[in-house]
Image: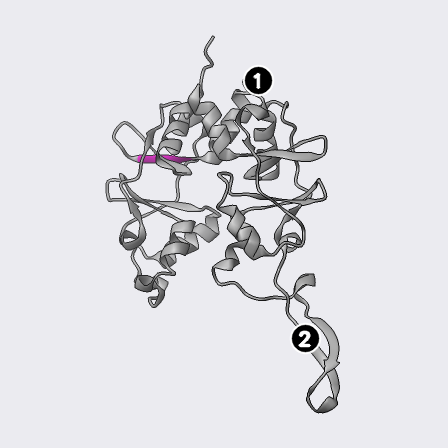
Amino acid sequence: MAPMYPRVEEYMSSPVVAVSPQDTVSHVRRLMLRHRVGRIIVVNEASLPVGVVTRSDLARLLGTERFSRRSLDSILVEEVMTPSPVTVKLNRSVREAARLMLQHGVSGLPVVDDEGRLVGIITKTDIVRAYAERLKGRYRVRDYMYTDPPEVGPQHSVFYVADLLDSHPSRRVLVVDGERLTGIIAPSDIAFLDNPPIVAREKGKRVRRFAELPKGRLGPVYKYMVLVAEDVMTPNPSSVGPDEDLGAAASLMLQGGYSSVPVVEAERPVGIIVKHNLLKALAEK
């Protein structure tokens, strides 16, 4: 018997934080911080969604020449929003919502009523919650996990890690010591590398040693070192086995607030599950 998929309205968030095209980016930023959200829906006077602004979009756009010299109070939402957002009706299934997210490469969808008015929002996290609560027992972790995630040692530089993050569809790097998993790194962990500082390790302290100074005198020399993987990783991440139910990975994500879960077999990492994998499992069959 085919599974009954829950409807979007059962898992969407409502009411929604929304702004108008004429609001300022400064206002959007305050709303994101106050409500701890990463996306804001833009609506017109009739409450119809006309755009979306995400935290990552702002970070990218505000660093460009067009906006870098302007104050946030002078930049209007309509200048930075992504127009004509993909929407989903509240009476459609979460399976359809997952398919739309995958098809359009987005992490959230405005939810609308039959008249097209904004009534909620559904995100990847909501889809994961639906899977954990209603769709367990269908697949094993190995059926949908990404295999061969990139690995680094604890002492690899963050610059090397940054290069690896974009080399794998999971956009994660596992930190291993010998063959034992000791940490995981996501893009958000090294976001500062857009303007990479050379900083000291050991909680920001400088490394001091004595060396010969000009004219034969001895004195302290402060040496600043580049951060390495163990400085920025999330240590000792929770994991699942490849033969566990995929729903167990979904539950673990929700319980810990994780966006990814390493897959470990015989104490050795063999894969990784991210929210995208759960959307595929829900959408494909």
Near-viewer residue (32 or 125):
125
Label placed on residue 222: 2
Q: Does 236 sit above or below residue 218?
A: above
Q: Quadrant of residue 115?
A: top left
Q: Secondary structure at mark 2?
A: strand
Which residues, given as a range, are shown in magenta?
A: 118-122
What residue is shown at x 61% (from left), y 26% (from top)?
248
What residue is shown at x 24% (from left), y 40% (from top)?
46
Near-viewer residue (38 or 177):
177
Near-viewer residue (3 or 193):
193
Q: Earlier in the sequence, mark 1 or mark 2?
A: 1
Q: 134 left or right of 235?
A: left
Instruction: Check residue 119 for magenta coloring.
Output: yes
What residue is shown at x 46% (from left), y 27% (from top)?
280
**Amino acid identity at mark 1:** Gly
Q: How is the image coloured?
A: one colour
